């Protein structure tokens, strides 16, 4: 998979993906001194609107892209003004967006309006199937899950949590579960988020407070020893999944054999509704 980071936040998250060999990293920002392989130094502009009006041609830069694309950015970044032009230039690929929302209450009025416009437009585009999927992540929600996060390394901690979770879900999507009831999400449910499960406590934590989910999918990564010896595990998993059942919401799960010492759980929620 190709990961394209746009703006400072997007580039920092793209860097967190770089530790996994499954991803090819491309970065675009106006903070780079010069362009080089897989780094595009976009010219600085005075406003969000100027980035939109003067979006560069990324043709040469994207020549190395030959498979799926994950575009990562925050609408609070001024450089995000060029996102629609960028999406048009990579429309020949299967594109998903990882959209990171900052703490909106800390943004200036101009930045907050800008972020809201980008956030809403992209959701409309997702629903119209202009791209494959839009994953929404809230830094505020991730911080709540992590608890106290020191100032030094604050964003690194949040970014690594987002990336490691997305990576494991990506790994599972290319693996066969040893047991499960997976079903393809409703085609119209293009707006998503993901998170983690505390298997011991049967607690789930999403990285964004997604409203009106249509599908909920649970992934259990269980080590071989537990799979062989824990006679209560199957009932525990199925009881939990059943407890999440509600009208007009599809629930499914999969259990995967892992080599990790600890057992892990992950969760994706899908919605077809615009998120306020």
Image (cartoon, rainbow, N blue to C red):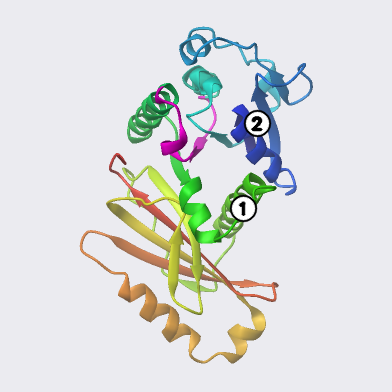
Residue 191 - label? none
206 falls in the magenta region: no
Q: Is residue 96 above or below residue 79?
A: below
Mark 1 or mark 2: name the one nearer the start of the chain.
Answer: 2
| Residue displayed at 53% across by 13% down | 51
Q: Which residue is mark 2?
A: 66
Q: Residues within 10 Å of mark 2 (few under 14, many from 20)?
A: few
Q: Which residue is mark 1?
A: 167
Left or right: where does residue 209 sit relative to residue 219? left
104 falls in the magenta region: yes
Query: x%, y% of residue 223?
Result: 64, 77
Q: Is residue 243 above or below residue 111?
A: below
Asked where in the image residue 250 lies, by quadrant, the reply is bottom left
Looking at the picture, tell me which residue is in the foreground, 103 or 189: 103
| Residue displayed at 37% across by 73% down | 241
Mark 2 secondary-structure assignment: loop
| Residue displayed at 46% across by 43% down | 135
Query: x%, y% of residue 221?
Result: 58, 70
Q: For the residues carrying marks 1 and 2, which lies nearer the camera in this image?
A: 1
Asked where in the image residue 37 lies, by quadrant, the reply is top right
Looking at the picture, tell me which residue is in the foreground, 215 or 105: 105
**Start-end of magenta stretch:** 91-109
Q: Quadrant of the N terminus?
A: top right
């Amino acid at each position: 998979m190709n990961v394209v980071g746009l703006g400072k936040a997007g580039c920092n998250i793209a860097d967190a993906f770089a530790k996994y060999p499954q991803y090819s990293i491309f970065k675009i920002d106006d903070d780079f001194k010069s362009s080089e392989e897989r780094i595009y130094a976009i010219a600085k502009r005075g406003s969000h609107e100027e980035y939109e009006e003067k979006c560069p041609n990324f043709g040469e830069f994207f020549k190395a892209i030959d498979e799926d694309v994950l575009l990562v950015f925050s609408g609070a970044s001024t450089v995000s003004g060029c996102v629609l032009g960028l999406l048009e230039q990579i429309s020949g690929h299967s594109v998903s967006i990882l959209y990171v929302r900052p703490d909106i209450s800390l943004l200036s009025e101009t930045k907050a309006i800008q972020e809201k416009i980008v956030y809403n437009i992209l959701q409309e585009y997702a629903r119209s199937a202009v791209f494959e999927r839009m994953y929404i992540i809230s830094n505020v929600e991730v911080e709540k899950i992590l608890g106290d996060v020191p100032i030094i390394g604050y964003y690194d901690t949040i970014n690594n949590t987002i990336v490691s979770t997305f990576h494991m879900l990506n790994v599972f999507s290319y693996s066969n579960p040893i047991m499960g009831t997976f079903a393809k999400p409703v085609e119209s449910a293009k707006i998503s988020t993901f998170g983690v499960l505390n298997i011991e406590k049967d607690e789930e934590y999403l990285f964004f407070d997604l409203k009106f989910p249509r599908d909920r999918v649970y992934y259990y990564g269980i080590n071989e020893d537990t799979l062989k010896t824990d006679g209560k595990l199957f009932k525990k998993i199925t009881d939990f999944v059943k407890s999440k059942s509600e009208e007009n919401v599809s629930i499914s799960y999969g259990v995967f054999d892992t080599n990790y010492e600890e057992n892990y759980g992950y969760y994706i929620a899908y919605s077809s509704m615009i998120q306020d």
